Image (spheres, grey):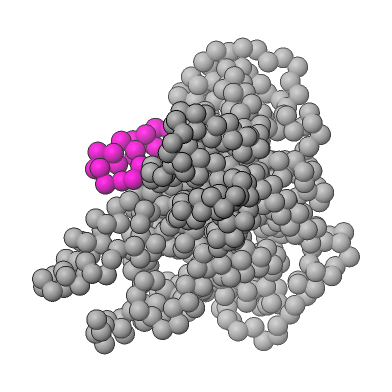
């Protein structure tokens, strides 16, 4: 079938318009992060600043570390540690659990999956008060380990869900063949299932990382100093207290967006696959 | 939830000679061992707080290290029902949930069709569309706070220079306006996710169906209504459930964009609970509120599930 010329033109125009709507606020944020503070508040506004300035990035990345910018840099490190730790633990325990859901037949399998998913649906605000009290009694407040423990509890159900669907999409015969050839179940999991499900595994890792990177409410309540504050908390601090210079918020926000945006673009095609395997049959 | 249906797929027994029950029993033990680490990681953290929130909601707890915590029975719940601020908050939350989910679904549908269309450099377009989804929620909030700012925001600058508005407008200045701006920010960020979700549904519709409909003389609109939408019902229903629940829980965006203001005009139920429990240190009352949220989410999910079961078109 050949698309008509009108249709082709319409589709391309629509794509350009949508792209502009999506990119416009983002582009302005990028522009603001390199504009002089005085240019930023000038009325009428000049879209193209006369002088570009990178002092905010310099402050954040190379400042002496005592001020806001230094706090921000520390929060990037914290976020990296917390998100990586969360991904490592939740994907590891998730691989075994997902294998059980996808490949084994046992009683209460549906119910068990439902309970895991229900815990993912729970609003964090419902757990906040008691968690706060427990963590304070275990001395886990304002610590990265405390955050990792809490994050794993909501990232793991998600990993189980996505990964078990990836495993289900692998033909069962493949696993059976491996076992006929003398593999144990775990041997089949590591030698056959995981290599075949590698795209799914990458997608799962990406989703898990984004979930942990994006989390805000727990981090807001459970952290108080540079020791464990994550990027979202640092940015919220920024935009609350230092709203006089939007450029600084913009620069911080852009830096905070680099890891998830790069991951999402790199794994773009898996995003589609990853969502579908969980959602839609066929 | 959706997984359960996928799990229905008949698994050919590896060796059918062995009695089924014994095999199940052995697999059951292995499954228990394999699921144990995940269960510890999840329920080790979640279980106690869920129970504890339920219990605390019957007490008056007014500090993190309280001296006395008198048992007050249902008084916290009674206070919630009596508080007109609570009802106003619930109303706002429902408005936010319904409008943002509705917009995201309809715009996401269009965007999904566009993502599926024969475009040059399609991957560039897809990479652009994925951007808002990958942007951290807090960054999204901070960004819109800048864009909508009354003094230096780029929206004011753009609209005045295009002569659409005469003077700078305070977008976040009125309660009603601010609530709609929160919706705008949410729609900007989440529509791509909805679109990608629907796109996968679109891609699973066989091209032959469209071919034969075309042969039968169906137009584009007719094909969309009679083929695309019915076949997308499973994807649409899942998006609807997930987005409704997520929108009902909205907190981050409100916190960064408006802090619930002006005049509590953007205070959603999660934000209200946060203020009560942590700013005002009313932990008992906050716990009762949290349980009300959980109950609302359960009711929402149950209503959806029933409606979907009745249509018999879902996978749930």
Q: Residue at x 51, y 54 (%)?
A: A177
Q: Is residue B157 visible?
A: yes
Q: Nearer the viewer, residue B190 or A185?
A: A185
Measured as percent of width and height from the top left, residue B14 is found at 47, 43
Count of marks overlaid on the render:
0
Residue drawn at (39%, 37%) of the image? B301
The residue range painted magenta reads B298-316
- Left of B94 or right of it: where is A252? right
| Residue that protrudes farthest toward the front in the picture | B17
Describe residue B110's horizontal placement relative to residue A89 as left or right: left
Determine whether, in the image, residue B62 is placed left or right of residue B76: right
Residue B40: % across, % down: 66, 34
Q: Position of residue A92 (x, y in %)?
A: 66, 48
In the image, residue B261 sits, relative to residue B299, either above or below, namely below
Residue B306, magenta (yes or no): yes
Question: Is A251 on the left-hand or right-hand side of A62?
Answer: left
Residue A126 versus residue A72 in the image, above or below: above
Which is the main secondary structure of the residues drawn in magenta? helix
Residue at coordinates 46% horizontally, 51% vertically from top-left? A172
Quarter of the image for residue A96 reads top right
Residue A210 seen by the camera: no
Q: Nearer the viewer, residue A200 or B311?
A: A200
Q: What residue occupies the far left of the structure in this picture?
A: B216
Quadrant housing the C terminus of chain B? top left
Seen from the viewer's position, the closer of residues B28 and B45 is B28
Does A26 appear in magenta?
no
Quadrant holding the N terminus of chain B: top left
Question: Which residue corresponds to the image point at 24% horizontal and 38% vertical from the top-left?
Answer: B310
Foreground pick, A157 / B198: A157
Residue A160 x %, y %: 55, 45
């Amino acid at each position: 079938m050949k698309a008509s010329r009108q249709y082709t033109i319409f589709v391309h125009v629509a794509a350009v318009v949508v792209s502009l709507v999506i990119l416009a606020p983002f582009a302005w944020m990028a522009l603001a992060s390199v504009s002089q503070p005085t240019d930023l508040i000038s009325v009428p506004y000049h879209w193209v600043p006369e002088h570009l300035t990178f002092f905010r990035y310099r402050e954040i990345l190379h400042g002496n570390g005592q001020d806001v910018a230094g706090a921000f840099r520390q929060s990037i490190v914290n976020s990296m540690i917390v998100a990586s730790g969360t991904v490592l633990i939740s994907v590891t325990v998730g691989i075994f659990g997902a294998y059980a859901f996808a490949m084994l037949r046992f009683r209460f399998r549906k119910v068990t999956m439902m309970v895991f998913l229900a815990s993912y649906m729970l609003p964090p605000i419902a757990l906040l008060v008691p968690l706060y009290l427990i963590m304070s009694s275990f001395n886990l407040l304002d610590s990265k380990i405390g955050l990792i423990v809490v994050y794993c509890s909501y990232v793991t159900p998600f990993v189980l869900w996505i990964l078990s669907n990836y495993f289900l999409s692998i033909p069962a015969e493949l696993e059976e063949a491996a076992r006929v050839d003398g593999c144990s179940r775990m041997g089949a999991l590591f030698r056959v299932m995981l290599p075949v499900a590698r795209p799914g595994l990458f997608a799962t890792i990406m989703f898990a990382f984004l979930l942990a990177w994006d989390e805000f409410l727990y981090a807001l309540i459970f952290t108080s100093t540079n020791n464990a504050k994550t990027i979202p908390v640092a940015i919220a601090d920024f935009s609350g207290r230092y709203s006089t210079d939007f450029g600084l918020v913009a620069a911080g926000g852009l830096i905070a967006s680099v890891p998830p945006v790069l991951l999402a673009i790199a794994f773009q095609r898996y995003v589609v696959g990853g969502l579908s395997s969980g959602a839609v049959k066929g | 939830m959706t997984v359960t249906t996928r799990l229905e797929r008949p698994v050919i027994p590896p060796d059918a000679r062995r009695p089924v029950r014994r095999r199940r029993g052995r697999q059951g033990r292995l499954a228990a061992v394999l699921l144990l680490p995940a269960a510890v990681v999840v329920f080790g953290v979640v279980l106690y707080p869920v129970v504890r929130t339920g219990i605390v909601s019957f007490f008056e707890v007014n500090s993190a290290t309280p001296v006395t915590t008198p048992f007050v029975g249902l008084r916290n719940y009674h206070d919630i029902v009596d508080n007109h601020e609570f009802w106003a908050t619930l109303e706002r939350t429902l408005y936010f949930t319904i409008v943002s989910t509705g917009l995201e679904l309809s715009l996401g549908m269009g965007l999904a069709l566009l993502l599926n269309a024969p475009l040059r450099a399609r991957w560039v377009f897809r990479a652009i569309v994925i951007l808002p989804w990958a942007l951290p929620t807090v960054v999204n909030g901070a960004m819109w706070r800048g864009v909508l700012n009354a003094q230096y925001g780029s929206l004011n600058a753009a609209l005045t220079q295009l002569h659409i508005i005469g003077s700078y407008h305070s977008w976040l200045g009125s309660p009603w306006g601010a609530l709609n701006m929160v919706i705008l920010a949410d729609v900007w960020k989440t529509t791509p996710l909805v679109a990608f979700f629907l796109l996968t549904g679109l891609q699973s519709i066989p091209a032959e169906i469209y071919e034969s409909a075309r042969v039968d003389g169906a137009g584009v609109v007719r094909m969309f209504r009679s083929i695309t939408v019915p076949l997308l019902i499973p994807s649409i229903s899942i998006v609807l459930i997930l987005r409704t629940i997520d929108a009902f829980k909205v907190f981050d965006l409100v916190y960064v964009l408006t802090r619930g203001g002006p005049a509590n005009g953007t205070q959603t139920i999660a934000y209200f609970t946060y203020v009560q429990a942590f700013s005002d240190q009313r932990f008992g009352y906050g716990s009762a509120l949290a349980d009300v949220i959980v109950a609302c989410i359960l009711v929402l999910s149950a209503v959806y599930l029933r409606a979907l079961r009745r249509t018999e078109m879902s996978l749930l």
